[in-house]
């Protein structure tokens, strides 16, 4: 099976030029001008951008939370991702409390196998780490699961203490893994939540008010300090606010290997959304929460200045009807999470490139190349180069699109960005050389996605 892409404007993190691409056996084999190769399929990309497929490094498909499950599984979630121009993603496998890392990985691999329509990998969430389990981190790295997430939030469920985080960081110093931190001060937040419930403050907006930006800033600072003591890099997930961004920026100014992502919802949504009348605000309940609107400009500046390296989604959808409604009378019972995997590339293009905040090269870097480099998939993924996987998106920069639950492909009954008009959309999406989306029609099949064995952090970045 061979494919020839003709006349496209190829945009990578570093380059911008017009050329043809020849694809054979899932790989890019030739890039050049006016290629004359015979191919099974020829696609004319004239006046379109040709970019490496998007990589979403923060998703939660088929994930248990608060007595329910996220509404997208590995079939529906990956199909939606493909429509949006994302061709690879990294989900989170969860170590069962008291169990092994292997149990967590096997459970999540079983969720994905036979369902995923695009390529995938996993981070490993560590819930406890006695000394006897430290070597299991080495085993994970050998198997290509080279990143580990630890929580400073959710006491009694996912939160671990500073000593556990420090031990995990020391272990990654030996095995080349990368620690990813959910940075919120969970113990303090729990007290604030208890106070609000006692005062009868139960509406969705109090979810945001109970998780102050200072709690994220403090924990971000602590995570960076622990990494500095351990002599390891650290990656802050879903950074939302200037309080936390300042800590990352200061660390990077000192030469520390501190990295961070933000998510599309923090660039577009605010306290105003979660404060909508009635129960409408429940659609915007996720953690960390939305912030005051002024933080958005700070986050865009962080992307411009490379103090934020990645834009992900933290895609963890729950239906408004029947799932979010579990917390109708008490915000603490609203399942935390929102849908975004389908709209990430569009939103960053429209708000970033169209609004003049970032270049097209920086857009590609944020949605694809940096995720690939940080998480050990580059140059197999995140690149348009000879030998790379033919994960390619033909992007129409002039295509206008209105985001809506009526037309999206995510298995959820609302959109966080309902009615937003964007300019720029994926027209054709190839995964390992196979056209899986074309002209808003899905052509892939469930189970075709492969597990990606990732390189250690030190080897990749």
Image (tube, rainbow, N blue to C red):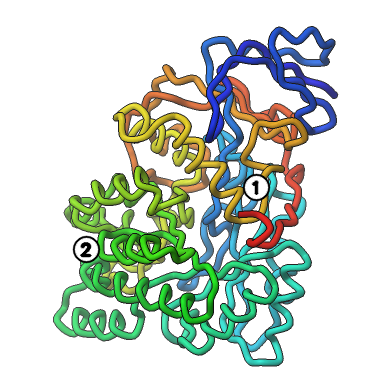
Circle 1 crowding by C-alpha within 10 Å: few under 14, some 14–19, many from 20: many
* Quadrant in which the C terminus appears: bottom right
Circle 2 crowding by C-alpha within 10 Å: few under 14, some 14–19, many from 20: many
Under circle 2, the secondary element is helix
Question: Image quadrant of residue 439?
Answer: top right
* Quadrant in which the N terminus appears: top right
Whether residue 185 is situated above or below residue 303 in the rendered picture: below
Q: Which residue is mark 1?
A: 75
What number is the disc on residue 205?
2
Question: Image quadrant of residue 203?
Answer: bottom left
Closest to the observer, 323 or 70: 70
Q: Residue furthest front?
A: 254
Query: Is 158 situated left or right of 437 in this image?
Result: left
Whether residue 137 is situated above or below residue 322 in the rendered picture: below
Closest to the observer, 43 or 457: 457
Residue 308 image position (x, y, % from top left): 40, 52
Closer to the chain start, of discs 1 and 2, is: 1
Residue 315 image position (x, y, % from top left): 48, 53
- Spatial CA distance of label 1 from label 2 is 32 Å
Residue 434 image position (x, y, % from top left): 74, 29
Query: Is 328 situated left or right of 341 in this image?
Result: left
Under circle 1, the secondary element is loop
Closest to the observer, 295 or 270: 295
Q: Residue at x 35, y 43 (%)?
A: 304
Q: Residue at x 36, y 80 (%)?
A: 186
Residue 184 image position (x, y, % from top left): 36, 73
Q: Residue at x 53, y 86 (%)?
A: 164
Whether residue 164 is situated above or below residue 349 in the rendered picture: below
Q: Residue furthest left?
A: 199
Q: Residue at x 78, y 32 (%)?
A: 27
């Amino acid at each position: 099976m061979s494919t020839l892409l003709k006349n496209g404007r190829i945009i990578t993190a570093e380059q911008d030029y017009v050329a043809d691409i020849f694809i054979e056996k899932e790989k890019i084999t030739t890039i050049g001008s006016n290629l004359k190769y015979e191919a099974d399929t020829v696609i004319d990309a004239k006046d379109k951008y040709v970019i490496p497929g998007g990589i979403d490094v923060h998703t939660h498909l088929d994930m248990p939370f608060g007595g329910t499950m996220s509404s997208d599984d590995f079939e529906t979630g990956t199909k939606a991702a493909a429509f949006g121009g994302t061709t690879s993603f990294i989900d989170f496998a969860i170590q069962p409390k008291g169990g092994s890392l292997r149990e967590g990985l096997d459970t999540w691999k079983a969720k994905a196998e036979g369902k995923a329509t695009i390529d995938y990998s996993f981070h490993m969430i560590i819930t406890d780490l006695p000394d006897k389990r430290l070597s299991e981190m080495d085993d994970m790295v050998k198997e290509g699961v080279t990143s580990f997430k630890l929580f400073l939030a959710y006491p009694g469920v996912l939160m671990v203490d500073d000593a556990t985080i420090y031990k995990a960081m020391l272990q990654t110093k030996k095995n080349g893994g990368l620690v990813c931190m959910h940075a919120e001060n969970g113990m303090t937040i729990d007290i604030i939540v208890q106070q609000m419930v006692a005062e009868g403050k139960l509406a969705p907006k109090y979810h945001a008010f109970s998780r102050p930006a200072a709690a994220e800033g403090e924990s971000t600072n602590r995570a960076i300090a622990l990494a500095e003591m351990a002599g390891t890099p650290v990656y802050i997930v879903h950074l939302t606010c200037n309080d936390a961004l300042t800590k990352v920026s200061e660390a990077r100014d000192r030469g520390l290997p501190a990295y961070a992502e933000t998510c599309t919802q923090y660039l577009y949504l605010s306290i105003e959304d979660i404060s909508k009348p009635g129960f409408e605000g429940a659609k915007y309940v996720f953690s960390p929460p939305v912030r005051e609107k002024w933080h958005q400009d700070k986050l865009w500046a962080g992307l411009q200045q490379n103090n934020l390296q990645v834009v992900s989604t933290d895609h963890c959808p729950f239906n408004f009807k029947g799932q979010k409604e579990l917390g109708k009378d008490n915000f603490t019972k609203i399942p935390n999470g929102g849908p975004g995997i389908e709209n990430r590339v569009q939103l960053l293009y429209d708000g970033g490139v169209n609004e003049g905040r970032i270049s097209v090269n920086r857009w590609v870097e944020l949605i694809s190349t940096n995720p690939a480099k940080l998480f050990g998939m580059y140059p197999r993924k995140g690149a348009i180069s000879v030998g790379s996987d033919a994960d390619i998106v033909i992007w129409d920069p002039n295509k206008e699109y209105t985001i809506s639950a009526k037309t999206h492909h995510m298995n959820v009954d609302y959109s966080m960005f309902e009615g937003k008009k964007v300019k720029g959309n994926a027209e054709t999406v190839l995964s390992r050389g196979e056209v899986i989306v074309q002209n808003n029609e899905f052509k892939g099949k469930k189970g075709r996605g492969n597990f990606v064995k990732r390189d250690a952090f030190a080897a990749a970045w």
